[in-house]
Image (cartoon, grey):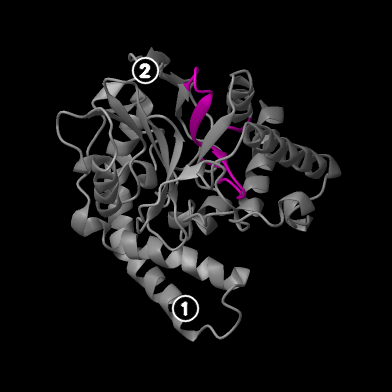
Amino acid sequence: MKTPIKHKLYRGTQLYKSMRPVLIIFFLPIFLFGCQTETAIKTKYDNFELVELGNGVYSCIHKFGGKATCNVGIVDNGSETFIFDSFLSPDVALELLNALESLDLSPVKYVVNSHFPNDHIRGNQVFSNEVKIISTSRTRELIEEEEPLQIAYEKENAPAQLAYYDSLYNSFNGDRKSREFQQILLWRPYYETLANSYLEVETRLPDMIVDSLYDLDGPDRRIQLISRGPGHSESDLIMYLPDDEILFSGDLIFNNCHPYVPHGDILKWSAWLDFMSSLDVSKVMPGHGPMGTRELIDRMKSYLRDLQISADIIAKSNTPIEDHDFSIPERYEDWWFDRFYEYNLRFAYESLVSQEIE
């Protein structure tokens, strides 16, 4: 996970400056909410749960207390195997390679980076040179530009954050099933990983570009890689299995947690979700959180729409945004990453004001 790029609406603003010290953690490790409806593989892995979605199709779902952070997809088309995203660290990606050895799959030939943040791309380096790394052209540029800055930032700041959460963990005397303690358990492994990034990460850039639609069909199934430009980030890429009705969405969809919105474009993100709604989808692997159905698409659309409605109410009030209540709406108050809600609403407001000025 990286320190956010300064969005055009945020360059030099007080909001961005106030956020910068904490935005190293804008994607947090996700707790495994609820139960998987698919078949969980009995083999135990430290950082993720391996879930079978169909013959030759799997998800690696971040495990509570682990260091995977994002979810990873595995798809065999009958002649080649594709990995969708590659985890936060080389160590967890090596655990993924061990899992692959236990499965009867075609050789791994491609790794897809859905977008640029570190939790989706730092496992790239563990794959052999024969494996192609795929991304959009803008995602490749962002990885090349931002990873050196991010690693330097983590070297400077992550050890102190790790020490802070260690202290919270060691001094905690309350209910260890409480949300407060679960938040501590989520953050500690993440900062432990970041504190070591500068020692182990060797950034591997994508070497194959997909900027629109690319078919990678095999004898057993069809695979489509699809990019429609900005959405959650400056450039997003999804993987869709039309015959299996399975969608690997990257961070265009989160499950049971607030996404971090200011990296993206709300209108274009909503258009992405409208497009995904048009696909035949029965299962969705979000970028973070457990597997779900196509209902996750509608929930993310509702979240963005509600942000826009709240921003419009603030704009029409003719009072400073600082005078308004940033309480999370009841329907989202049990979602994780709740601290992002204020950032998201401020961004939605500034986006709306900018559009009106233009």
Q: At x 59% / y 45%, what residue is drawn?
A: 255
Q: Name the foreground residue: 130 vs 273.
A: 130
Question: Which residue appears farthest toward the left when viewing the image?
Answer: 129
Q: Position of residue 165 (x, y in %)?
A: 44, 73
User: Which residue position is annotated with label 1?
Assistant: 169
Q: At x 38% / y 47%, what residue is drawn?
A: 119
* Above/below status of 24 relative to 166: above
Please indicate, yes or no, whether residue 112 appears anywhere in the rendered image: no
* Above/below status of 39 relative to 218: below
Please indicate, yes or no, whether residue 266 appears anywhere in the rendered image: yes
Dots 1, 2 in contact, CB < 8 A: no
Around disc 1, counting alpha carbons within 10 Å, would you say few (fewer than 14), some (14 to 19), or many (20 or more)? Answer: some
- Tag shown at residue 302: none
Around disc 2, counting alpha carbons within 10 Å, would you say few (fewer than 14), some (14 to 19), or many (20 or more)? Answer: few
Q: At x 61% / y 49%, what residue is drawn?
A: 258
* Above/below status of 213 relative to 141: above
Q: Position of residue 110 (x, y in %)?
A: 27, 28
Tag 2 or tag 1, which sits nearer the N-term?
A: 1
Left or right of 169 on screen, residue 82: left
Q: CA distance from mark 1 to mark 2?
A: 48 Å
User: Which residue position is annotated with label 2?
Assistant: 220
Q: Name the foreground residue: 158 vs 247.
A: 247
SS state under label 1: helix
- Inspect the magenta stretch and tell me whether residue 244 lies in it: yes
Q: Position of residue 199 (x, y in %)?
A: 19, 59
Q: Name the foreground residue: 357 vs 148.
A: 148
Amino acid type of the residue tagged 1 in the rendering: Tyr
Q: Position of residue 137 (x, y in %)?
A: 34, 24
What range is drawn magenta here? Answer: 241-266
Q: Nearer the viewer, mark 1 or mark 2?
A: 2
